[in-house]
């Protein structure tokens, strides 16, 4: 279990007043929690700059499963990368459209390449890679 | 079934040469597919500006399930919004860290509010909302 | 002159260690300065959500001044909006390419509309709107 | 002078209808111009991934010039990098707040480092780096 550090921050009262308003709107329990979130968000952005560090992401895809061979092709791509693609969830949005989300773990460049390949597949209407984190040291 | 339209594009040869290089790197089948992706990406961004239109998103969360009450709290938040949260997938990253992805459908402002609430919950280390689309007319 | 408030933050030691590393890399003088920057960045993002509040931006444009009528057209657009466009700076990048940066002040929607119009002008190769702030209460 | 290439694009009629609506809202002259903009935007993003290629950016800063030594410090930082910082524009927003925009040219990593240093300087309230392009081959 990690130990807790405490330290002081100084800030103009007017800036703090605006921040407190923001904290209230976003329903944070307190300033520490809100600031920890800001810090972690920056660190996650930074983590993705480091090409050799193992990290975690999600890939969101919207596609029409009536598109010929598409489901097969997407499944095949994912199996080719079974050491990176951990698991996936499929949602039937309507008669035509599917939402699929993949959880992936690997190096930033590997994850980016897999996301590019899936998103560029014919029939995939929209795709987005979320760069998150293994959660360690956060 | 939607009908296919065809139209011509003019572009400087040097710009087209760079675009063809990009298409190759991203493994697009052809220029039409790559351009359709650029178009759809812009339209999805635009869709999220329209506060009244039903849309689709995914919320990615990283958290430590040892944090007291956290799993309960996250589940409760999601059930409170069962008309928006369609389903979720959970991945055990290591002994401590979990990745959870939620598929959500609703108005942009509703989805944003739920994402804010989940991400601001104490113990959630990183969170990200992906704004995607119902896939209709894309 | 605004008064300075002081308050305490608690954070896991491992998270703080990573943040201190980040602070060093970015050459921040201390944790307070780094955290104030994170806070201000969030507040500026928020400010741009509020459609009625006066705010400040910069519009960066890259264009080829040999394109017929382009310089005239861009100047005309800017004069039409002289209550919003404060001033501009022009840099000659090479024989063909110019960089122009405009400082603008107005409502978010007005600024966005002007940026859209300038960026969509034929001959403008790349354009980007930076949403910053009047600096008040920050 | 670069030669113009022409090529055909196929697209679902419903997608094209939505794109035409978008083109109208953004006041593009025609589809070619809108699509060239989408293409150039992607290529500029890509350009910034290539760490060795000379590129162009703008750095926007908001600061309070009453902050002791700040103007001197910012000027000194800029002079230290006179081979990268091409020129700057200064706008007096109110009695306290200044907007400064710098035009910079160099390698992505060099530009990023200068932007980090300026933005992290005590008294700078908000800063943003725009990654644009030399305009060549766009």
Image: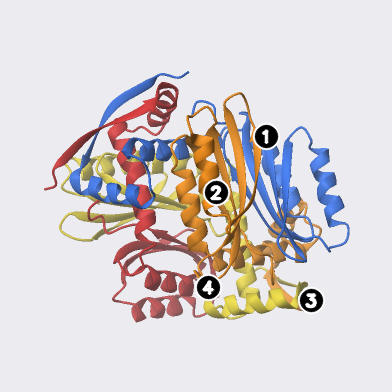
Chain colours: A orange, B blue, C yellow, D red
Q: Kindly indicate whether the residues beneath marks 1 and 4 are on one polypeptide chain.
A: no
Residue D88: percent from left, percent from top: 34, 66
Which residue is more in the foreground, C10 or A57? A57
The residue that disc 3 covers is A2
Mark 1 residue element: strand
Q: CA distance from mark 3 to mark 2?
A: 36 Å
Q: Kindly indicate whether the residues beneath marks 3 and 4 are on one polypeptide chain.
A: no
Chain letter for the residue marked with disc 4 in the picture: D
Closest to the camera, between mark 3 and mark 2, is 2
Q: CA distance from mark 1 to mark 2?
A: 25 Å
Q: Decide: marks 3, 1 in contact (CB < 8 A)?
A: no
Residue B138: mark in rendering: none
Mark 2 residue element: helix
Which residue is more in the foreground, B75 or D70? B75
Q: Kindly indicate whether the residues beneath marks 3 and 2 are on one polypeptide chain.
A: yes
Instruction: Rate crowding at label 3 as few (under 14), some (14 to 19) or many (20 or more) other CA atoms within 10 Å.
Output: few
Which residue is more in the foreground, D107 or A34? D107
The residue that disc 1 covers is B105
């Amino acid at each position: 279990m990690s130990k807790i550090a405490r330290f002081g921050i100084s800030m103009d009262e007017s800036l703090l007043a605006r921040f407190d308003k923001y904290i209230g709107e976003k329903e944070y329990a307190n300033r520490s929690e809100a600031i920890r979130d800001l810090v972690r968000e920056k660190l996650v952005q930074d983590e993705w700059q480091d090409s050799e560090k193992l990290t975690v992401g999600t890939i969101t895809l919207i596609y029409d499963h009536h598109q010929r061979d598409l489901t097969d092709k997407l499944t095949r791509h994912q199996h080719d990368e079974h050491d990176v693609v951990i698991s996936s969830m499929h949602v039937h949005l309507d008669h035509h459209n599917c939402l699929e989300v993949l959880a992936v773990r690997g190096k930033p460049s590997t994850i980016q390449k897999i996301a590019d390949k899936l998103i560029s597949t014919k029939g995939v209407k929209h795709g987005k890679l979320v760069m998150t984190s293994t959660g360690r040291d956060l």
